[in-house]
């Protein structure tokens, strides 16, 4: 891992940097599996190795590929980095040894989650029960952050108006991968339904196995983006309307918030699912499924939306370039 | 003793490499990559703290009593997804800067700013 990062520091070609970052993401994900953090590994594999590589690639394609060589020598920066690093290493000597059971991190609140969560929430995946129930309010905040980031990207990059339809069509006929790569097209045609199915499985089986709304949303978005890359953006956007995606993103946040308000009305506190049904454990179950659905909707539509917004902008510029000169 | 802190040292090394990219490189996309690496090193740190010797993944099952600490997992899981959303925002800003200045190198952008003053 350190080796890959050193290579990233030296590379001037931004395309290789992005590819190396994808490898780095995959390595990090395998490290998380080794550390018993399966849920996190799942997320990192789909986000770090998949979506972030893709977004960076689109951004590199939109800007410039080569990095300009640095004029001034980076000695001061190097000095700062080495001093800070040495101080941090010095700090690690006070840390408890890696993996011991009596480290402060393991002795306080974590024990309670491990021992009591099954009776209180009724689902085996502790990560999901902490995420969706005990810390439901934090997760709500995070969904809102994702939603806000999506809106901000839209505000910065969305294209008002557009190029006339005829010119657009001819451009896509030349450039979309649909006509050019037959093997890719057929293989992905077979794969896409399975990717979407898998996303739904991860979404609704998240209480029993690693998974949940965040991972499912990202995987679902990856399937849609693959579709858009293969069949061209205009084809994809005929089926997946941008306005529709915006609506879905808002709907996800709304579902999450509404569950909280309903538990208010039933006499509990905000996002207390126990009051949703007669039986508190069943109520928790329903609440978790609903809010995971909200999370999944928001994450999937925001990430697809971000990709479309980036790609739309890029294609419009290319069209202007090729016709203007 | 040495093996016990090996993980934290890798974290420090990654963090410092990311930090170095952020302060020493002028290219905005490279800076965002550096930020991502810095971020990942923090994730690795949290997950290392959560690891328990002889423990298993925190999904309750028959026959296991030791589990890794689920709380850091929750924090990092959401942090990763929020991280990609903010990275996308940073990239959107970079794309707009490129349109306005015709460059994503800090030096050129500063030069243009100084000229216009």
Image (tube, rainbow, N blue to C red):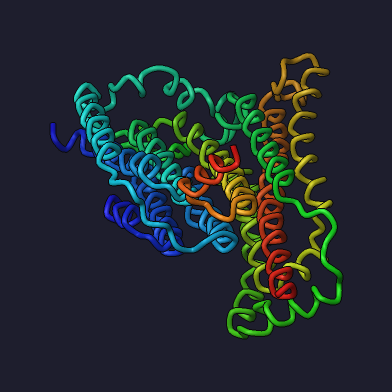
Residue lying furthest left in this view?
B1
Q: Nearer the viewer, residue B114 or A237?
A: B114
Snapshot quadrant of residue A132? top right
Residue beneath the point at 62% across and 30% down = A139
Which of the image's four quarters has the C terminus of chain B?
top right
Q: Is residue B35 left or right of residue A50?
A: left
Q: Is residue A121 visible?
A: yes
Snapshot quadrant of residue B93? top right
Task: Where is residue B7? Give x, y as percent.
Answer: 26, 39
Which of the image's four quarters has the N terminus of chain B?
top left
Task: Where is residue B6? Give x, y as percent.
Answer: 21, 38
Above or below: residue B110 compared with residue A20: above
Task: Where is residue A146? Give x, y as percent.
Answer: 65, 39
Q: Nearer the viewer, residue A186 or A271?
A: A186
Q: Nearer the viewer, residue A23 or A169?
A: A169
Above or below: residue A151 compared with residue A195: above
Q: Is residue B107 left or right of residue A305?
A: left
């Amino acid at each position: 891992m350190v080796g890959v990062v050193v290579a990233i520091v030296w590379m001037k070609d931004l395309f290789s940097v992005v590819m190396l970052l994808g490898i780095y993401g995959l390595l990090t994900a395998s490290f998380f599996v080794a550390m018993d953090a399966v849920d996190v590994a799942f997320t990192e594999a789909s986000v770090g190795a998949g979506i972030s590589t893709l977004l960076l690639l689109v951004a590199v394609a939109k800007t410039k590929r080569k990095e300009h060589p640095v004029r001034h020598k980076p000695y001061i920066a190097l000095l700062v980095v080495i001093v800070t690093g040495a101080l941090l290493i010095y700090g690690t000597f006070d840390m408890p040894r890696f993996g011991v059971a009596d480290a402060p991190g393991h002795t306080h609140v974590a024990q309670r989650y491990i021992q009591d969560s099954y009776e209180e929430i009724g689902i085996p995946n502790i990560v999901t029960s902490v995420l969706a129930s005990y810390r439901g309010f934090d997760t709500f905040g995070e969904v809102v952050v994702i939603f806000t980031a999506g809106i901000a990207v839209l505000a910065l990059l969305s294209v008002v108006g557009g190029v006339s339809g005829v010119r657009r069509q001819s451009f896509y006929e030349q450039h979309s991968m649909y006509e050019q790569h037959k093997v890719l097209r057929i293989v992905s045609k077979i794969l896409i339904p399975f990717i979407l199915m898998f996303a739904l499985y991860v979404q609704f089986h998240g209480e029993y196995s690693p998974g949940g709304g965040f991972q499912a949303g990202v995987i679902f978005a990856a399937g849609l983006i693959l579709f858009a890359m293969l069949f061209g953006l205009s084809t994809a956007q005929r089926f997946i309307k941008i306005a529709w995606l915006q609506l879905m993103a808002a709907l996800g946040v709304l579902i999450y918030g509404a569950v909280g308000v309903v538990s208010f009305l039933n006499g509990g506190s905000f996002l207390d699912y126990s009051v949703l049904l007669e039986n508190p454990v069943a109520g928790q179950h329903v609440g978790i499924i609903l809010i995971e659905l909200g999370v999944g909707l928001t994450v999937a539509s925001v990430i697809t939306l971000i990709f479309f917004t980036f790609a739309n902008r890029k294609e419009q510029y290319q069209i202007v370039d090729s016709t203007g000169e | 003793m040495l093996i016990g802190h090996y993980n934290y040292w890798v974290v420090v090394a990654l963090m410092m490499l990311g930090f170095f990219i952020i302060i020493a490189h002028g290219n905005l996309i490279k800076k965002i990559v550096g930020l991502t690496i810095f971020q990942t090193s923090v994730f690795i740190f949290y997950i290392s703290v959560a690891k328990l010797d002889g423990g298993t993944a925190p999904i309750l099952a028959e026959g296991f009593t030791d589990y890794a600490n689920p709380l850091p997992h929750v924090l990092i899981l959401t942090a990763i997804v929020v991280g990609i959303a903010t990275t996308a925002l940073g990239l959107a800003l970079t794309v707009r800067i490129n349109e306005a200045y015709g460059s994503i190198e800090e030096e050129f952008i500063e030069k243009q700013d100084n000229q216009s003053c």
